[in-house]
C-alpha cells in the first residue's frame, strides 16, 4: 500500500527523519516537511497547489509592479511606450496581472529609441540576457534580446520595435 511521505515522516531517499516546517507566503501559512540531509521538501498535494498558486499570484503582482516602474521610467525619459499582448490585456483588468498570468511583459518602442530604452531598463534594474545565440536568432526580428529581473527568477521584459516581423504579410 502507498503511504504518503509526510505520514511516514522519513525521507524516501535516505530514510532519515523529516523536519516539520512552517512558512507563509504573504499572510497565508502552509506546512511542509524537509529532509535533514538536503534531499528536498515534501508536502501534501493540496498544500503544494496552495503554495504554487500563492507564488504565481506573487509573481504576477511583482511583474505588474516592475512593468509599471519601467513604463514610468521610459516615459520620464521621453520615450513613448505601449503595452502589448498579455500585459495590455492584464492592465485592463486591474493594477496587477493576477487575472491574466504571463511569463513576460512586451513593450513597443520606436526603433530610434532602442539605445535609450535599453539604458533606461538597465537603470531600473533589468539585465539583458547574455545569450549570443539568442541575440543572433533575434537579429532583424520584431523584438530585441529579452531583459530579466535578477531579483525574481523568470521575470522577463521584451522590447519590440514592430508589431510583426517585416516579412509578415500583415506588417
Image (cartoon, helix red, strand yellow):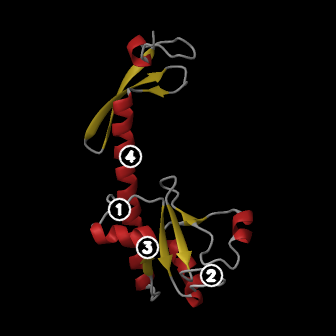
The residue labelled by disc 3 is: 70
Q: Nearer the viewer, mark 4 or mark 1?
A: 1
First reached walking from the N terminus: tag 3 or tag 1: 3
- Quadrant showing the C terminus: bottom right
**CA separation in Å, label 2 and label 3:** 29 Å
Which of the numbered marks, if any, corresponds to residue 97?
1
Q: Nearer the viewer, mark 2 or mark 3?
A: 2
Q: Position of residue 103 (x, y in %)?
A: 48, 59
Q: Residues within 10 Å of mark 4 (few under 14, many from 20)?
A: some
Circles 4 and 1 in contact, beta carbons < 8 Å: no
Q: Nearer the viewer, mark 2 or mark 1?
A: 2
Q: Nearer the viewer, mark 4 or mark 3?
A: 4
**CA separation in Å, label 3 and label 1:** 15 Å
Q: Position of residue 22 (x, y in %)?
A: 33, 29
Judging from the image, what secondary structure is the residue with disc 1 in? loop
The reply to whether residue 124 is in sight is: no
In this view of the protein, which residue sits in the foreground, 104 or 19? Answer: 104
Circles 4 and 3 in contact, beta carbons < 8 Å: no
**CA separation in Å, label 4 and label 1:** 13 Å
Q: Is residue 157 left or right of residue 20?
A: right
Which of the numbered marks, if any, corresponds to residue 168?
2
Amino acid at each position: 500500500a502507498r503511504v504518503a511521505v509526510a505520514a511516514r515522516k522519513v525521507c524516501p531517499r535516505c530514510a532519515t527523519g523529516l523536519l516539520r516546517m512552517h512558512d507563509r507566503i504573504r499572510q497565508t501559512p502552509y506546512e511542509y516537511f524537509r529532509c535533514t540531509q538536503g534531499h528536498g521538501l515534501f508536502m501534501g498535494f493540496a498544500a503544494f497547489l496552495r503554495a504554487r498558486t500563492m507564488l504565481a499570484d506573487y509573481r504576477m503582482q511583482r511583474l505588474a509592479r516592475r512593468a509599471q516602474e519601467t513604463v514610468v521610467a521610459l516615459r520620464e525619459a521621453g520615450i513613448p511606450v505601449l503595452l502589448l499582448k498579455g500585459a495590455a490585456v492584464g492592465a485592463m483588468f486591474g493594477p496587477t496581472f493576477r487575472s491574466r498570468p504571463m511569463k513576460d511583459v512586451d513593450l513597443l518602442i520606436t526603433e530610434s529609441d532602442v539605445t535609450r530604452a535599453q539604458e533606461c531598463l538597465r537603470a531600473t534594474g533589468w539585465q539583458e540576457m547574455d545569450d549570443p545565440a539568442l541575440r543572433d536568432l533575434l537579429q532583424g526580428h520584431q523584438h530585441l534580446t529579452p531583459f530579466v529581473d535578477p531579483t525574481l527568477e523568470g521575470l522577463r521584459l521584451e522590447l519590440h520595435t514592430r508589431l510583426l516581423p517585416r516579412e509578415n504579410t500583415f506588417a
